[in-house]
Amino acid sequence: MTWRHGTPDTMLFTVAGSSCSGKTTAARALAGIDGLLVHDFDEIGVPRGADKVWRQRATEEWVRRVLQWQQEGLDVILTGQSPLGEVLACPSATEVDGIAACLVDVDDAVRWQRLEDRDPGKWSEDAKRAFIRWARWMRGHAADPRHMPEAITRGGHGTMRWERWRGWARGDRRWVVRVVDTTGRTAGQTAADLTRWVAEARADKAAGRLALSGRWAR
């Protein structure tokens, strides 16, 4: 899905979340924001047996695409599974003008029910439990870069630059992830939350307050 309007300052907005968080549905409602392209990670094509190494390699490919759109003065929202640590570790991430991260989350029981309702019979009990475990890890990662980093760093793609943030601690001003909980909320309410987040991040960048801009990796 792609929508294009206008040309303000350029940023990459990452909207991550485990399956059935509601991130893709909410992102569709951001079509009216000026200067914004909205893309879903899976547009790149998901091969059979896609794993962590593939996801990290594909994240770098998306970052490179963002850099192309950056030349046109366009912001990009990218929805998918890539947590902030993977985005920042992409080799090309330091070339992006500004980065803002959001985690779209939902209560575990609600996620389980959504998985069953969306694709009845598709997911095994083990698969659904894996989605829940990934969601719980993403919550911890969003709050603290030291939360089990090995979940993404161990056995990851060889080009990733984990050292950029490996030494950061909880509370580091550069580690900011907006958490949007969709539990008990409509898609419209979640979209409004994301719209406010985009506006606030853009304002922070314009005012020089956005930590993940400029020389954040140095």
Image: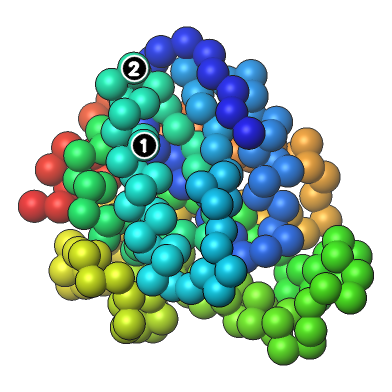
Label 1: element kind: helix
> Between 177 and 8, which is closer to the camera in this rendering?
8
Q: What residue is at 21 percent from the left and 54 percent from the top? A: 91
Query: Left or right of 140: which side holds 217?
Result: left
Where's residue 4, x and y in %?
54, 18
Where's residue 172, x and y in %?
26, 61
In the displayed structure, would residue 170 be above or below residue 198? below
Instruction: Tell me the distance, in whole angstroms, between the alpha carbons under discs 1 and 2.
Output: 12 Å
Report which residue position mark 1 lands on. Answer: 65
Crowdedness of circle 1 by 10 Å Cα count: few (<14), some, many (20+)? few
Where's residue 175, x and y in %?
33, 58
Query: Left or right of 32: which side holds 95?
Result: left
In the displayed structure, would residue 143 be above or below residue 74? below
Residue 110 visible within the image: no
> Between 48 and 115, which is closer to the camera in this rendering?
48
Report which residue position mark 2 lands on. Answer: 72
Q: What residue is at 69 percent from the left and 59 percent from the top? A: 21
**Residue sitting farthest toward the left:** 218
In the displayed structure, would residue 169 be above or below residue 98? below
Residue type highlighted by circle 1: Arg
